[in-house]
Amino acid sequence: MELLSSIQDSPDNMLPSLREDIAIWRQSAKEWSEEKNTPSMSVKEKYTLAKRLMAEGDAIASKNPGGELIQYLRASAILHDLLGKAQANQQSQEMLWLAGQSAEHLSELNLWTMQDVYYEACVRKNQDKNLSRSCYSAHENSLVSSYGAASRAGLPEFAKQHLDEVKSWIK
């Protein structure tokens, strides 16, 4: 909050396009600091919090793309923690789906496309066929976008073969 406040308090040194984002980030950080989260939260409570943060991020992004940064960073951290401790259960596939969605929103901060790793892992889990199909579709769209193609037809052959292999995991 101190860093965001100092940036916000120096408008001459700030890009005009970031003014609104920084104000939203600062408000999000303030709300976060006022939350009463404890390390003793259950897995279910943490999972519910991650989903709530994702929904808040979506709502903010629909009004001001770029303002959702804090919500997605927090959700991503929670999901990574949960996935690191997750045992094979029904929620782990959805956690992978949400982690992929979060990584897409944070992709400008990433050095590589983490969402593709999450989407592939989500398909591989294959516990919920509909969720596996959604993860596959998101993975395909991400690859098409990363290659700057208009559709799957514009992908290199090795990428098409990779997608075919991933799709074959859905049974």
Image: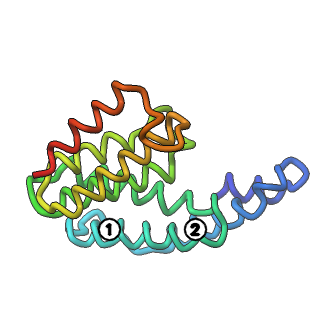
Q: Position of residue 167 (x, y in %)?
A: 22, 44
Seen in the image, is 152 located left or right of residue 43? right
Seen in the image, is 122 located left or right of residue 140? left
| Residue occupying the point 15% across, 50% down | 170
Q: Which residue is mark 1?
A: 38
Up the image or down, 51 lies above or below 14; here it is below
Say which amino acid is labelled 1: Thr
Residue 10 found in image quarter: bottom right
Which of the two labelled residues, at mark 1 and mark 2, occupies the earlier sequence position?
2
Foreground of the two, 138 or 45: 138
| Residue occupying the point 39% across, 73% down | 52
Foreground of the two, 119 or 83: 119
Outermost front residue: 153
Up the image or down, 88 lies above or below 113; here it is below
Residue 21 found in image quarter: bottom right
Q: Position of residue 55 (x, y in %)?
A: 44, 72
Q: Which residue is mark 2?
A: 28
